[in-house]
Amino acid sequence: MEDRAVVAVDLDYENIGASSGGNLLMVSASGTAVEVR
């Protein structure tokens, strides 16, 4: 029996001002995946 899971998730975001007056939102996600045998 094999199982897979994500045990930790980290979300980061940053507001980036665009030159045309608008806004951009940069989002990054990382996680720790495990496989149990």
Image (cartoon, rainbow, N blue to C red):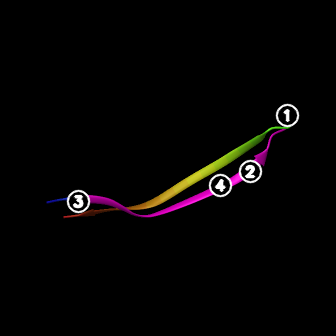
Q: How many residues crowd around disc 2 within 10 Å: few (fewer than 14), some, or many (20 or more)?
A: few
The disc, 1 or 4, on the residue closer to the chain's N-terminal end is 4
State how far apart marks 1 and 4 are (Cα).
21 Å
Report x, y in % for residue 8: 44, 65
The disc, 4 or 3, on the residue closer to the chain's N-terminal end is 3
24 over 29 or under it: above or below? above
Discs 3, 1 touching: Cβ within 8 Å? no
Which residue type does callout 4 highlight? Tyr
Q: How many residues crowd around disc 3 within 10 Å: few (fewer than 14), some, or many (20 or more)?
A: few
Q: Which residue is mark 3?
A: 3
Which residue type does callout 2 highlight? Asn
For residue 27, side relative to residue 36 (left or right): right
Q: Which residues are magenta?
A: 3-20
Tag shown at residue 13: 4
Which residue type does callout 1 highlight? Ser
The disc, 3 or 1, on the residue closer to the chain's N-terminal end is 3
Q: Please check the rendered image and state whether residue 18 is part of the magenta-colored stretch, yes or no.
A: yes
Q: Which residue is mark 1?
A: 20
Q: How many residues crowd around disc 4 within 10 Å: few (fewer than 14), some, or many (20 or more)?
A: few
Determine the image quadrant of residue 35. bottom left
State how far apart marks 3 and 1 are (Cα).
48 Å
Q: How many residues crowd around disc 1 within 10 Å: few (fewer than 14), some, or many (20 or more)?
A: few
Residue displayed at 28% across by 58% down? 4
Discs 2, 4 touching: Cβ within 8 Å? yes
